[in-house]
Amino acid sequence: MTPPAITTISAGDTAWMLAATALVLLMTPALGLFYAGLVRSKNTLNTFMMSIAALAVATIMWALVGYSLAFDKGNGFIGGLGHVFLSGVTFAPRAGGSIPQLVFFAFQAAFCIVTVALVSGAVVERMRFVPMLVFSALWSVLVYAVLAHWAFGGGWLQAHGTLDFAGGVPVEMGSGFSALAAALVVGARKDYGRQALLPHNAVYVLLGAGLLWFGWFGFNGGSGFSTGHASVLAFTNTLLAPACTLFVWFVLDLMRGRRVTAIGAATAIIVGCVGITPAGGYISPTWAMALGAVAALPSYAVIVWRPRTRIDETLDVLAAHGAAGLTGILFLGLVAQLSWNGVSDGLFYGNAHQLAWQAIAAGVTPAYAFGATFVLLRLIALFTPLRSTEREEALGMDVIQHGEEAYASGEGAILVSTEAGLDVPVAVAQP
Amino acid sequence: VKLVTAIVRPEKVNDVLEALFRAEVRGVSMSRVQGHGGELERVETYRGTTVKMELSEKVRFEVAVSDAFVQSTVEAFCQGARTGNVGDGKIFVSSLDQAIRIRTGETDEGAVTPVSK
């Protein structure tokens, strides 16, 4: 007899997934650039470094335990420990797959990394770097891996038929509602609501958004794990939906302020990409365009509402990811089409059951992400202060946390070199 | 008419402006400057290169005020800029030979008194 199909590796699928993994990995520095442009110049490096930090800690945690808890067979809530320390992750594919599990692992690792980086947007400009490293490491396991198991790894949501193509549950709602909790626990920046805290480089923001969109073709296009129909559909929908979000955002900007803003446009690109993430391979291109347009509305509303509150969720992760991810998950329940995805219909095509399970995912995910993040940060705060002092915050996190400046002029800088004997103690005035 | 020059920490600029407005001092110029007082040097590292930043970023305020306003201006600067650590800055008060408002040609007291609309 022929060997079972599950051991067959497809060269084409593997080639695409290798490239897609690299595309997704690019999203993390792209996000760092996007975030760095949105903060004040004295916090540029610290903000960027919070994304870079995810490349280290999330990858390590994912290899040690996160991947296993997400994708090993376990119970409905959490996976098992069979793949801890990458045991059993080899050239052989997972059941039903056509790519080596090693590639699958790396692709999913890149998802975990960018999601951890996303959450940092809530706490930039005041959270200390080392507690952030601890939080990132633990969050990637306790929140991301759990949600990934629910949606992708055979957990209870997936088992009941919730559709989530590329991460509306773990990535988008997971990061968005965790960001809200993080902002509440860490607290507002000292100048929040007192001074205008403006983005210092809108060009970084636009370039970061552009690179994120580019990377998102791997993110959504790779989530079919093949070069098959689902991947192709998701790939093209990743072009269509954000374009519509962008245009609707222009119109909303015009209606509200009579001007189209650049930072609004960058935000719209993210919102569109997020909106199509859960739905990419499940809905028709026409509905993808509609979803892109619809996704602009709740996110725009949250962005207008949030700064009027005392919640300093600094870079609007809730609006861009939480709200847009939720919109995508629900919209998918309406317009999923069996004739396009071969899996399930949505409400508009006669399957109310699908919408029900999308709604359950949209209710439970935010609750878990918010609650778990809130408790986790409170626990870390028992051991170490989460944020810098007011004085340090005023000086800027770059100098305080990293001893570097993003835009060092070099004026007045004196080389310290032991060979030249220049590091003699310098007399300083006593306070 | 006196010229009050104050060198303060950049991160205290908003507090200083607030204090000045509370003291009803109007007509302020500010510029970014670099300088060295008795402050501890900041050490920064870029790859293998460690440098001491001898010059710190400061902000210089210049306000021309009538004699009656000198005391409240100085107090406003002290109140807004003080943190209690080395590097809070200095205030210099100097005499002005003449002050002229370009638009109207008013001189001295008249030139530095805010226009009431």
Image (cartoon, coloured by chain):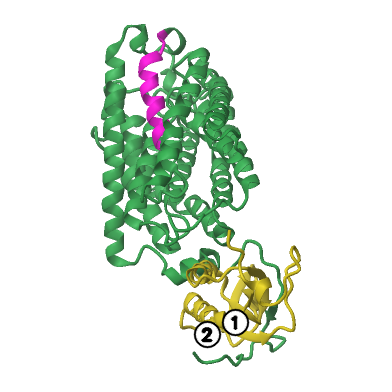
Residue type highlighted by circle 1: Glu
Residue A286 percent location from the top left of the image: 52, 13
Mark 1 residue element:
loop
Residue at point 57% right, 57% down? Answer: A44
For residue B86, the mark is: 2
User: What color does chain B have in the rendering?
Assistant: yellow
Q: Position of residue A67 (x, y in %)?
A: 38, 41
Left of A349 or right of it: where is B62? right
Residue at position x 63%, y 85% from top? B93
| Majority SS type along the magenta span | helix
Q: Quadrant of residue A172?
A: top left
Mark 1 → mark 2, Cα distance in angstroms:
11 Å
Residue A164 seen in the figure:
no
**Which image quadrant is residue A323 in?**
top left
- SS for tag 2? loop
Reply above or below: A164 against A87.
Answer: above
On the same chain, marks 1 and 2? The answer is: yes
Q: Which tint was used for chain A?
A: green
Question: Of the numbered discs in the image, which one, if any, rests on residue A83?
Answer: none
Q: Identify the residue under disc 1.
A: B41
Q: Earlier in the sequence, mark 1 or mark 2?
A: 1
Which amino acid does the dot numbered 2 rest on? Val
Quarter that holds the N terminus of chain B: bottom right
Residue range in magenta is: A322-338
A157 and A256: which is toward the camera: A256
